[in-house]
Amino acid sequence: MSLSSIANAGMSAMGGLSKAQQDMLANAPAEMKPFLEAQMKMQKEQELTQLITQMMKQMHEMAMSVIRNIGG
């Protein structure tokens, strides 16, 4: 699985809110609902960005390890 396919899968999964988040939104005051929903989506986006960043870092470290081993 490529990094871009993981990112695309994460973005599509990010679209919906969890049951707990939906319950929280349902119980929130009407004037706070748009703000809370935007905040929840932003948090999911940050988590996805962090996941992709960590994956890229690990891929880089693996590639550097291979290069170091080839160098003798």
Image (tube, rainbow, N blue to C red):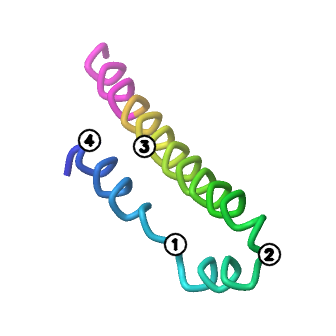
Q: Earlier in the sequence, mark 3 or mark 2?
A: 2
Question: Which residue is the site of mark 3?
Answer: 55
The residue sitting at 37% across, 36% down in the picture is 59
Whether residue 63 appears in magenta in the rendering, the answer is yes
Q: CA distance from mark 3 to mark 2?
A: 38 Å
Q: Which residue range is magenta in the image?
A: 62-72
Mark 2–mark 1 distance (CA, rounded to whole Å): 18 Å
Residue at which label 2 appears = 29
Q: Residue furthest left?
A: 1
Q: Which residue is mark 1?
A: 17
Choose top left, top right, bottom left or bottom right for residue 66.
top left
Q: CA distance from mark 1 to mark 4?
A: 22 Å
Foreground disc of the pair 1, 4: 1
- Quadrant of the frame with the C terminus: top left
Proximity of marks 4 and 2: CB atoms separated by less than 8 Å: no
Q: Is residue 27 above or below residue 14?
A: below
* Image spot of residue 18 (x, y percent): 53, 78
Residue 42 among magenta residues: no
Helix, strand or loop at label 4? It is helix
Image marks 2 and 1: residues in contact by CB distance under 8 Å: no
Residue 33 placed where, x, y %?
A: 70, 67
As shown in the figure, which amino acid type bears the numbered disc 1?
A: Leu
Which mark is drawn over residue 4?
4
Residue at 28% across, 42% down? 3
Residue extending furthest toward the front: 30
